[in-house]
Image (cartoon, helix red, strand yellow):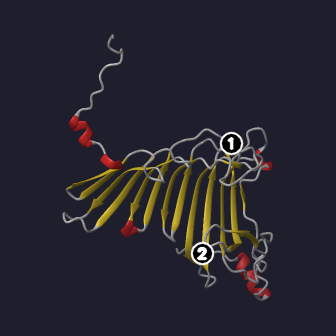
Amino acid sequence: MPLPWAPKLFIDKDKFLRGPPMGEVTRFYYKSRVDIYTKYMQIDGLTTKLTLYDDYSRTLVNEVRCIYSNRRNNLIVRRRFPYHFKTIEYYKPNFRSNYKPQGATDSNNLQPWPHWKKIEEVDRRHRIIDYYPYRHTDGLMKRHEILGADWPEHRHKLHTTKEYYEGRDDYLTFRSFSYVTKELDDYNCFSFPTCYDKVTGYIVRMTQHFDKNPNKDGHEQVAKMVPAAHTGHRPQQQKKPHHSHLPPQRRRDRTHHRRLRPH
């Protein structure tokens, strides 16, 4: 009987020992620890976990770096700094425009893909989200959320969100709004559901910046828009200053007064 065409299977012993036997392996180095997992072994797609320490006894954790693969949300790297309460996540690009949510049965309930590029978050302080330039629905490129800032006018905590856009039809480039989690009496607030603790937010301040449209005249375009949310301070027309609170003689002297130069 002739020999088969396929060569004899051979596995190097050193390469086999360097791999993760039983699906996982742990190695220790100076001020670091590496956990290696085989693909599809972890339910969250974790393949490598690197832990960096500040001391040689490996008790003070400086950073925990996790590498993922084959995740539904395209997450590839997550860096966690436990003593700074800081987390940084990196995502690979995805060119699809929408996706089907988990648990949805109807194909019409599609949601736009977020196109996350990088998310930097400090717990209960701020979060910065960078997007890939594939968001053709709204053109959002960056979103910065600031939580729990002091508001000198009131005793409530003020939350601010800043958004940066590119390539929009209305030439909107920047939008920011500030909101509180408790409704105020002297503000005509617009309410919306927030993603933090499932509470309702009330907008008290908003600002929008627009780029110039080259197809229209400059005096017909809006460069900045600040809607008035405070009911006690409505926008008024700016007038020239006058001195009606002074007597007539003092008003006349103040109007025609000239400083004499010393001789």
- Judged from the image, the secondary structure of the residue bearing numbered disc 2 is loop
Q: Residue 225, position in %: x, y?
A: 73, 60
- Judged from the image, the secondary structure of the residue bearing numbered disc 1 is loop
Estimate the spatial distance between the alpha carbons at disc 1 and disc 2, rounded to whole Å: 67 Å
**22 vs 141, nearest the viewer:** 22
Left of 42 or right of it: where is 258?
right
- Asked if residue 17 is positioned above or below residue 31 in the image, the reply reads above
- Identify residue type, mark 1: His
- Asked if residue 133 is positioned above or below residue 153 in the image, the reply reads above
Identify the residue shown where x is 80% and y is 49%. Answer: 220
Identify the residue shown where x is 68% and y is 55%. Answer: 103
**151 vs 184, nearest the viewer:** 184
Q: Residue 85, position in %: x, y?
A: 42, 68
Q: Which mark is residue 260?
A: 2
- Asked if residue 119 is positioned above or below residue 8 in the image, the reply reads below
Q: Residue 134, position in %: x, y?
A: 62, 41
Q: Which mark is residue 136?
A: 1
Dot 2: few (<14), some (14–19), or many (≥20) neighbours within 10 Å? few
Left of 263 or right of it: where is 249?
right
Give the image quarter of residue 248.
bottom right
**How many circles with numbers are drawn on the protein?**
2
Left of 249 or right of it: where is 35?
left
- Asked if residue 155 is positioned above or below residue 92 in the image, the reply reads below
Q: Which mark is residue 39?
A: none
Q: Quadrant of the N terminus?
A: top left
Considering every residue shown, the one lying at the far top of the view is 2
Identify the residue shown where x is 55% and y is 55%. Answer: 129
Q: Which dot, 1 or 2, sits closer to the camera?
A: 1
Q: Earlier in the sequence, mark 1 or mark 2?
A: 1
Q: Residue 221, position in %: x, y?
A: 77, 49
